[in-house]
Structure formats: structure tokens, C-alpha cells
Image (cartoon, grey):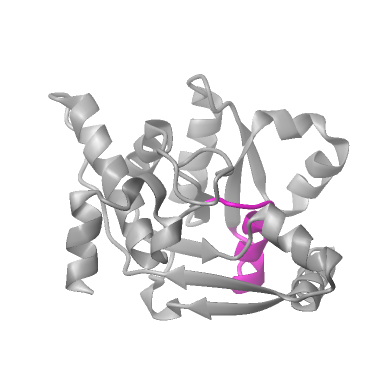
Amino acid sequence: MRNFLRWLIRAIIRLIARVDVRGYEHLPEGSYVLATNHIGIFDAILAFYALDRWDMYIPVAEKWEQNRFLKWLGKYFNFIFIDRYNPDIKAMRTLIHLMEEGNLIAISPEGTRSRVGSLIEAKPGVTYLATKLNRPIVPIAITGTEDRVVFGNLKRLKKNHFTITAGPNFTLPPLSRENRDEALKQSTDEIMCRIAALLPEKYRGVYKDHPRTRELLTKT
């Protein structure tokens, strides 16, 4: 079933879009975290389009568990349904256990789709998870998958152009008990600014003028 679903995903994506994938050289061996922006419903399946790995797990908002089709699909695409608004200890433990077994985790620090098409302020809970996992983090920048753009092009029978760009992987320092909130904010900004630096300016949103984003752009 999974091989068929991968074939189906790639067939559908190739039918509706031209996809450019860049930065494979930045992917480490073994277990790591993919941290990506989130601008459209196609973002999650693009991970399975770009990577030939089925040991990748994706935290998904718990509200989608009520959708029978998505719940069924989640069994094959390794969805981990998680409460975005309250501490979900069970889901956190599941994700940490999966990483300890050598799997991949794909996360969106923003916690939801950006309705404006550019980066919105990230939620610290995802960053907390990333620090607990103690694995390399690979920033991923996605463009062209905004729902209004994709479906607008489909109505006009026009092919879309998706890009997936991976940046250099990095690690976050463990969170100390002192100034914990400040450290968590800094780590969250680090992840988001690394994603922002990979994106065209119009996609950088609230992180466009962040000093760390400017610093990373200067280095590149």
C-alpha cells in the first residue's frame, strides 16, 4: 500500500506542478528533524515526494483526527495527532521514542498553515520538542504551495511551480533551567530565521527584519 501511495503522490504532484528540490547535501545520516514553513495543504505530502524514507513522522493537529479519511491516511503517512494548544505529554513521549529509534520527524514550528502566505510567529512548543530530541535540525523552505495559488492555477489549467530547499543542518543547545523562557524564544527564532534565510523576501513574514535573518543572509 505504501509503495502505491508514494507512486500516486508523485503522479499527482507531477501532474499539477513542476517541483525543484535543492539541498540534499545538507541532509545528515540517520535520525534528524525537518523544520519547515507551512503555507498549503500540499506541504506535508511533499516530504514523501522528496524523500525515499517511510520512517518519517509528522505531527498533525488533533482536529484532523475527526476526519475519517485523514485518520485512515495518517496510518500510512505516519501522522501523530497532537494537541496544539495544551501540553500533549503522550504525543511528546511518542515522538521522542520514535527519534530514539532512529526515525525522522517533520515539524512546522508555526503550528498551523499561514493564511498570509509568509512566515507567522512560531509556537515555542515545537522548539521545546526539537531541543528534547537532541538531533540535527534541517531547515526547509517551501514556496509555491499556497492553497489559493495552487487551486487558482488548477482552475486555469496552469501548472504550478513548487520549490523545496534544504539548508545546512544545525543543533540547538539544551534548555537550561535558568532563563528558560528566554532560551526557548532564542531557539525558536534560530529555527525560524534559518528557514526565513532560505526563502524569497516576500515569504519571510514576521522574520524578515529579524537581526538573525539579516546575519544569515549576509553570510550567504
Instruction: Residue 175: tell me if it is visible.
Output: no
Question: Which residue is pictured at 64% across the width and 64% down the height?
Answer: 46
Residue 199's quadrant in the figure?
Answer: bottom left
Q: What is the residue that sits farthest to the left in this orientation? A: 178
Image: magenta residue range: 38-55
Magenta span includes 156: no
Q: Is residue 200 left or right of residue 151?
A: left
Question: Which residue is pictured at 34% across the width and 39% down the height?
Answer: 132
Residue 23 in the image: above or below residue 148: below
Residue 62 in the image: above or below residue 60: above
Front-lying residue, 6 or 54: 6
Can you say which quadrant of the picture contains the C terminus? bottom left
Front-lying residue, 199 or 111: 199
The x and y percentages for residue 218 are: 18, 69
Instruction: Residue 170: tell me if it is visible.
Output: yes
Question: Which residue is pictured at 39% across the width and 55% down the height?
Answer: 204
